[in-house]
Image: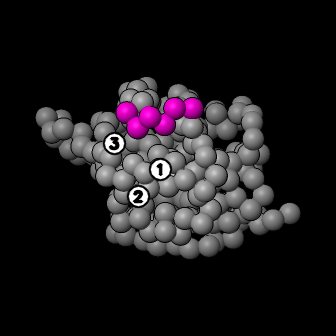
Amino acid sequence: MNRGRNDSRPAGVVRIIGGRWRGTKLPVPDVPGLRPSSDRVRETLFNWLQPALPGARVLDLFAGTGALGLEALSRGAAAVTLVERDRAACAGLRASIDRLGAGAAAKVVTADALAWLAGATGDPFDIVFVDPPFADDLWVQVMAGLAAHVAPEAWLYVESAPRALADPGPGWTLHREGATREVAYRLYRRDPG
């Protein structure tokens, strides 16, 4: 977590924990509200998602360090779109993608996530990661904007403060969930039809 840190300390790193880039460190820029998912939470999430990853098209909204999207790519996803509004974080994402040699499989979009959802076009995503800054309380708006961008039977990962109302609403079924003292994390499956 970056909140409350002494500005003289380095921003830190997170690491990719599985797949072809296992152990690769990703820089954590000093961006307000940026709170990378812990290794433990990501390990659990990707154990749940492993069968769905090969060939998947992934959307990582509020990408920050890119840890979720790049982890998916490392573990077999075909492509990831990383949406992040902070320019410094986007520069870090592009540098990480270049260092990994991810090429065209990883696309960085510098944009506000809600604005991007309102105007984006293209093929639907198979897996979506939604982990916005908790203080912004954007879950309702994000969930409303996602419908046009997800494939039938898509997977949706939502990370929130433990007591936040981050339910995606009708059309989604809770598949798995977990919690730590700092976060609640849930994986949903889109209802077919």
Q: Residue at x 13, y 35 (%)?
A: 8
Q: Is residue 131 left or right of residue 121?
A: left
Give how far apart the Cα atoms at labels 1 and 2 are: 7 Å
State the residue in front, 87 or 165.
87
Does 11 sit above or below residue 73?
Answer: above
Q: Amino acid at mark 3?
A: Leu
- Check disc 2 and report its element: helix, strand or loop: loop
Q: Is residue 109 visible?
A: yes
Mark 1 or mark 3, earlier in chain: 3
Residue 117 lies in quadrant: top right
Q: Are marks 1 and 2 in contact (CB under 8 Å)?
A: yes
- Check disc 3 and report its element: helix, strand or loop: strand
Give how far apart the Cα atoms at labels 1 and 3 are: 13 Å
Give the quarter of the figure containing the C terminus. Answer: bottom right
Give the residue at mark 2: 18
Badge number at residue 74? 1
Q: Residue at x 68, y 53 (%)?
A: 126
Q: Residue at x 53, y 28 (%)?
A: 110
Q: Which residues are magenta?
A: 99-104
Q: Position of residue 84 (x, y in %)?
A: 50, 35
Give the residue at mark 3: 26
Give how far apart the Cα atoms at labels 3 and 2 are: 13 Å
Residue at far left of view: 8
User: Of helix, strand and loop, which mostly describes the magenta segment?
Assistant: helix
Q: Is residue 133 visible?
A: no
Q: Is residue 95 left or right of residue 49?
A: left
Q: Position of residue 184 (x, y in %)?
A: 46, 66
Q: Residue at x 64, y 47 (%)?
A: 57
State the residue in front, 57 or 117.
57
Does 12 sit above or below residue 173?
Answer: above
Residue 186 lies in quadrant: bottom right
